Every structure is written in C-alpha cells, then in structure tokens.
Image (tube, helix red, strand yellow):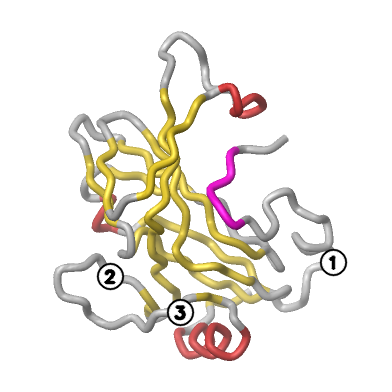
Amino acid sequence: MGILPDNWIREMALKRGMIEPFAEGKPRKGRISFGTTSYGYDYRLAAEFRVPEFDTHNPIDPKRIGQLQFADVRQSSIVIPGHRYILGRSLEYFRIPRDVLVICQGKSTYARCGLIVNVTPFEPEWEGYATIALVNSSHSPVKVYAGEGIAQIIFLRAEAECNISYADKRGKYQAQRRIELSKI
C-alpha cells in the first residue's frame, strides 16, 4: 500500500470526479487552509449542522440515536460549547476508487483549540458527503467556520483491488447527501 501524491489527487478529482467541488491547495489569507496538500486533501466544512439537544439523565445510545433530538442549523459558523459535540458534513462530495482507502485526521489549527474531528475511513467505492463529529474537549467554547478546512484526508492505494467494496456490500451510508445519524 502506498500514499498517493497531490498530482494523482488532482487528476482523479478533475478527470474522474473523485472530489467535487475540488480546490487547489493555495494560501487564502485569513482562512483555515483547504485543498490539495503534498500527499492529501484538506476538505471543508459545509454550512449545515445537527446540534444535539441533550437530556443529561439519559445515555446516548447509538442503536437508538433517533431518540435524541437534534436541531438542524444552517449558518456560516457555529460555536460548540465546552465538552459538547455537534455533527457536520463535508462541503466536498467524494467518490473513492476501488483500490483506494482514505484515512482522515482533524486539522492542527482546530486541534490546538481542543477540537477533535472524528470521521471513519472512506472505504473503497464509498461515495457521499462525509458526516463529521466535532467534539469540543476543552472547557471553553470553540468556533468553527463553514467553507474552510476542517480535516485532512490521506489516500492509500492498495497493491490490488479489494474483493468486496463498500458499494458491493451496499453500505448503509453509501451516497449520503446530508448529515446521517448512526444506522443499525
């Protein structure tokens, strides 16, 4: 397995629609960086959020996440209170090739504020907008900005195509168009 460079990412995005909309990684004064990096892509946060309305007496159950109420919010930035989380989604729509696995990490700009960005790997032949959990681990509120970089992805190419891709097994988050809650 090998890490894929920026020229491969650019070609796959522009010629095969792997990342839409695609952005070059150039400096943007006063904005958190996004676009191609040496061996990855910094993707942006969309202006769409789901904010949980917590009931401190009941646990959050991933098998019954629908019991937790969420407020749908659309705005250019949002403040996450200390020790809380919200859900967001990527601005970019991804189409991952069959011989590629994508690993995601939060950006250091937000990590330095106590923000943890949690996204699972993008499996071979998964496509959609990425649902992102944004966890404020600090005591203080943290502000995040839509349209700017939120996380970096690294593309790993396998030596051979997988036997069963995410599309083959009809994954439950395939082609998601909005922020998705957990599905069982």
Q: Which residue is mark 1?
A: 163
- Rendered image: mark on residue 33: 2
Residue 119, above or below 29: above
Q: Is residue 67 magenta?
A: no
Label 3 residue SS: loop
Name the kind of residue labelled 1 in the image.
Answer: Asn
Q: Which residue is mark 3?
A: 22
> Which residue is located at x 54 percent, y 72 percent?
155
| Cα distance between the residues tagged 3 and 2 | 13 Å
Quarter that holds the C terminus: top right
Q: Earlier in the sequence, mark 1 or mark 3?
A: 3
Name the kind of residue labelled 2 in the image.
Answer: Ser
In this view, the mark in front (3 or 2): 3
Dot 1 alpha-carbon crowd within 10 angstroms: few under 14, some 14 to 19, many 20 or more: few
Name the kind of residue labelled 3 in the image.
Answer: Phe
Looking at the rendering, which quadrant does residue 28 occupy? bottom left
Q: Is residue 107 left or right of residue 14?
A: left
Predominant secondary structure, magenta span:
loop
| Cα distance between the residues tagged 1 and 3 | 29 Å
Looking at the rendering, which quadrant does residue 87 occupy? top left
Residue 20, above or below 151: below
| Cα distance between the residues tagged 1 and 2 | 36 Å
